[in-house]
Amino acid sequence: MTPIPNLNIVPFVSVDNMMKLVMRIGIERFLTELEAYIEEDFRRWEMFDKTPRVASHSPNGVIELMPTSDGTLYGFKYVNGHPYNAHTGRQTVTAFGVLADTASGYPMLITEMTILTALRTAATSAMAAKYLAPKGARTMAIIGNGAQSEFQALAFKAVLGIDKLRLYDIDPKATHKCAHNLAAYGFDIVQAKTPEEAVTGAQIVTTVTADKKNATILTDNMVGEGIHINAVGGDCPGKTELHRDIVLRSEIFVEYPPQTWIEGEIQQLPQTHPIHELWKVIAGNETGRSNDRQITLFDSVGFAIEDFSALRYLRDRLQGSGLYEELDLLADPDEPRDLFGMLLRSVKPNTDAA
Ligand SMILES: NC(=O)c1ccc[n+]([C@@H]2O[C@H](COP(=O)([O-])OP(=O)(O)OC[C@H]3O[C@@H](n4cnc5c(N)ncnc54)[C@H](O)[C@@H]3O)[C@@H](O)[C@H]2O)c1
């Protein structure tokens, strides 16, 4: 791969260019290729620096920093979660991120990550379901039909072949929007009036709601044997979606336990409760679903390695695309120690002065 020239100019991917890139590649192909990058990084999980993300909580939401490195590359994402932002016309989740070279410490890429986060979250969910969902699953319920929902639907279509959707949101306008946006993608779509109706007959249930509380999106009686739950929306202390009894009945798979104990559905359980690390299933060290009756739960909170994979994928896909701007981000004096001299030379001497 030819590197982007001039190390002092940092490629920047705007929202506009990200949209062009995704549509040029095709959303389903983008999701499938991204899923492969995430899977590759989950297989080499042990190589990465790992830490629970650094969260700054405030009454309306949270701002988080998510760093990781594989020793050669370093990546981080800035992301917020503000469930009431929609009331003022803003996104619940926005993000941007950086990929850097550990040898020099220089950033190699800076990018919008709001769209990229929706894609990586969906690709990660589909990756987990590949190992955990019942074989031959075709029907998925999606509860919470906001910004993430269409991405989830398309990742499950691209990676697992899901072609029937059962949608529910407390706000019917959100369900209508989701169904409308997905109309051209070949799904058989039911717009359900209750969460109970949505989960009926679904082999996979995705919960992707936003609220700042311990909500009960699914109650125990709604969850039958053999289904896979992809719980995406509970991702902060005091912000969960599933009734504790469902979590207790499930075989639980998580990204990075020290972060998920703080943020995931399992914050409702004592830390002695058995859980599985998803990377071990993907690396072939543990089995995923082991029988048809098991309820499997992917307790997704979103981990830095998934963003790192997304940044890596973006870097590779950007080559030759022209879909970036060149940012003058790094000071580059001719003599590295003469930073001050460069500053002085930036102002031309006024030769007209008396
Ligand atoms: N796990 C991850 O990696 C990850 C990544 C991104 C976002 N998230 C989380 O996913 C959630 C959804 O994000 P978004 O960007 O789609 O938010 P959004 O605000 O665009 O959509 C959320 C939707 O949930 C609906 N909703 C709220 N309470 C509900 C309930 N009780 N029943 C049914 N629907 C309900 C809202 O009406 C809204 O349409 C957020 O909580 C966000 O923090 C998780």
Image: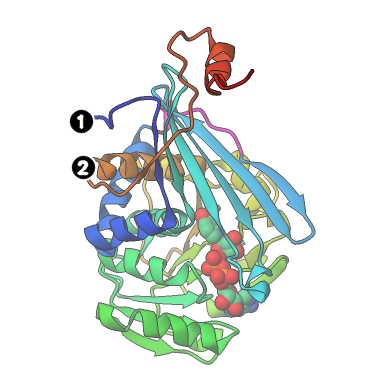
Residue drawn at x 39%, y 59% as measured from the top left:
16
Q: 286 or 316: nearer the eye?
A: 316
**What's the magenta region?**
45-52
Where residue 337 sits in the image (x, y, percent)? Answer: 53, 7
Q: Quadrant of residue 134?
A: bottom left
318 shown above or below 140 = above
Hey, which residue is sitting farthest right in the picture?
Answer: 59
46 part of magenta stretch: yes
Q: Which residue is mark 1?
A: 2
Is label 1 in a helix, a strand or a loop?
loop
Kind of residue sitting beneath label 1: Thr
**What's the CA distance linking mark 1 and mark 2?**
9 Å
As drawn, is 87 to the left or to the right of 275?
right
Pointer 1 or 2: first along the chain = 1
Specify the quarter for ligand 1: bottom right
138 part of magenta stretch: no
Q: Which residue is mark 2?
A: 320
Characterize the magenta stretch by its predominant secondary structure. Answer: loop
Asked if one can make out residue 147 in the rendered structure from this viewpoint, the answer is: yes
